[in-house]
Amino acid sequence: MSELFFDGRPVPVEPDQTVAAALWRAGVRSWRTTRRAEAPRGLFCGIGACHDCLVTVDGSAGERACVTPARPGSVVSATAPSTVDPPARGQWAARGRFDVAVVGAGPAGLAAAATAALGGGRVALVDASPRVGGQYWRHRSDGPAQDRAVFEGLKSIVEERVEHIADATVWFGEPGFVLHTTAGTVSADRIVLATGAYDRALPFPGWDLPGVVTPGAAQALLKGSGVVIGREVVVAGAGPFLLPVAVGLAEAGARVVEVVEAGQPTAYLRQPGHLLGAVGKLGEAGRYAAALARRRIPYHVGHAVVAARGGPDGVSEVDIARLSDGSVRTVRCDAVAVGYGFTANLELALLLGCGSRRAVDGGLAVLADDDGQTTVPGVFAAGEVTGVGGSTLAVVEGEIAGSAAAGGVLSTRELRQLRRRRDRLRAFADAMHAAHPVPAGWMSWLDQSTLVCRCEEVPLRDVERAVQELGATDARTVKLLARPGMGWCQGRVCGYPTAELAAHLCGRRSTREDHAAFAHRPFAAAIRLSDLAGD
């Protein structure tokens, strides 16, 4: 059997696995310790956003184990670097000039690239992963994919007509547009941003224990590497995504102890008109609910995981509260997948100078018009980055943006049909967010020592001190005084909760500016390309 070496220990490697998946399957749940408390850290987000899982691979420091392929013979070290090695010199080569460059190969990106390519121009599809599909269609090369017909159709067009530049993380951009990636530079006349989203996490005591991960991490391990996060798992948070995660884990052999939903799905019935535009989604949810019932997996609404306990080896139990009366019960488990919807991945959009708006779910999203055109001419956006709404909506938006970026590929009739469908799907997405909101009382779960920022190990007491003693009146000042959002993940994980906490402590509702203070911009100066271009 193939194997890599982790701190001198041989670890089996299977095809398509990541380093994190190989370590997890071998029983290793943490592989580094934090700078201050020397607390164990391992997998958390599972898609490269949080940087909790950093390792050194074959001498290259700062590699994210959750997205780094596990290669036989690799030497992996659990040391946490203070800096990240720059790209190798050979990776700076130019990849060519394109009419359209699409960033992100998930549902929106695949649809945008395929549609733009039908116009006959030269199209590039740039993605950080080795395979197309994004997180939604993230699966092993021999595994199943949801909506396979759609995926295979888009994939076939991309393979025939698009230059797919894989393993290419965009780390900077220039006017023109020139995208600097870890696989070389890509130049294009127009850009479509389809950078997707990642799980929204809320802090609670014990959320930093090994074995507490996001639902996206559980799904990525399972779909991408065939690894189950635990033997006895609690799936918790808010949103319909909890259902496929729970069913997938159960089908793979895990005992799903229960599914804990903070929202009230019956709220969908208050907007029956919006349900008509997403009959397929309702049927899908019904199938998942039936699968839970067949396996006798409890599904509790109006509940939330409010604390986790365990040791260096991982979580061993969680407290689950009934939100209506605060009553708490304790459940034993060896893994927890918990998340409250998704947060748009805005990094590249903000770097390019695109305007943002406050989304229906409370987070930020890229501001785009009816064609997906952002506030920066030549830059289009589609999918979750414009507002979280699911894969079907992402595909429709990708088709619209891809057509516009390529100069008008689709006919007026086709565009009119797509826009009507998009509007129906967006209305359903609004109903979804209303039924699965972030729990209003989540701040009451925290105690003074609860970490708000995992990277910088900032507890609640430091955030409170920034406001109550040091005089901070907004989220940006809290960030400067207490350092949440200043670590490896640059606020991807702690940004939403810290912005909400800061506003709450200041006695007001949060604003777009509060959340924008934690929106990560590569190279902190956040040079606006529109400024450089003189627009």
Image (tube, grey):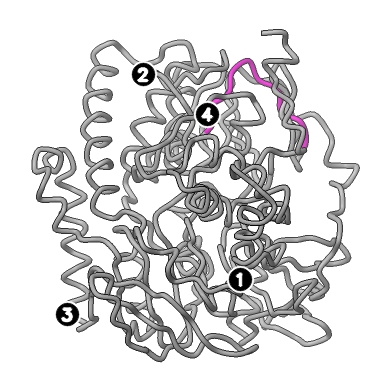
Q: Is residue 134 visible?
A: no
Residue hosting label 3: 294
Q: Is residue 313 left or right of residue 241?
A: right
Q: Secondary structure at mark 2?
A: loop
Q: Quadrant of residue 48?
A: bottom right
The amino acid beneath tag 1 is: Leu
Residue hosting label 4: 161
Numbered disc in front, either 1 or 4 = 1
What span is colored magenta in the figure?
184-193
Q: Secondary structure at mark 4?
A: helix
Q: Earlier in the sequence, mark 2 or mark 4?
A: 4
Q: Is residue 20 left or right of residue 264?
A: right
Instruction: For the residues labelled 1 and 4, say whether their Cβ atoms are less than 8 Å apart.
Output: no
Residue hosting label 1: 43
Q: Is residue 517 visible?
A: yes
| Residue toward you, 99 or 240 | 240
Q: Position of residue 435 (x, y in %)?
A: 23, 53
Instruction: For the residues labelled 1 and 3, say whether their Cβ atoms are less than 8 Å apart.
Output: no
**Residue 189 shown in magenta:** yes
The outermost residue toward the top is 534
Q: Earlier in the sequence, mark 4 or mark 3?
A: 4
Q: CA distance from mark 2 to mark 1?
A: 38 Å
Q: Residue at x 16, y 61 (%)?
A: 286
| Residue toward you, 428 or 402 | 428
Numbered disc in front, either 4 or 3 = 3
Q: Position of residue 38 (x, y in %)?
A: 76, 79
Q: Earlier in the sequence, mark 1 or mark 4?
A: 1
Q: Is residue 203 left or right of residue 464?
A: left
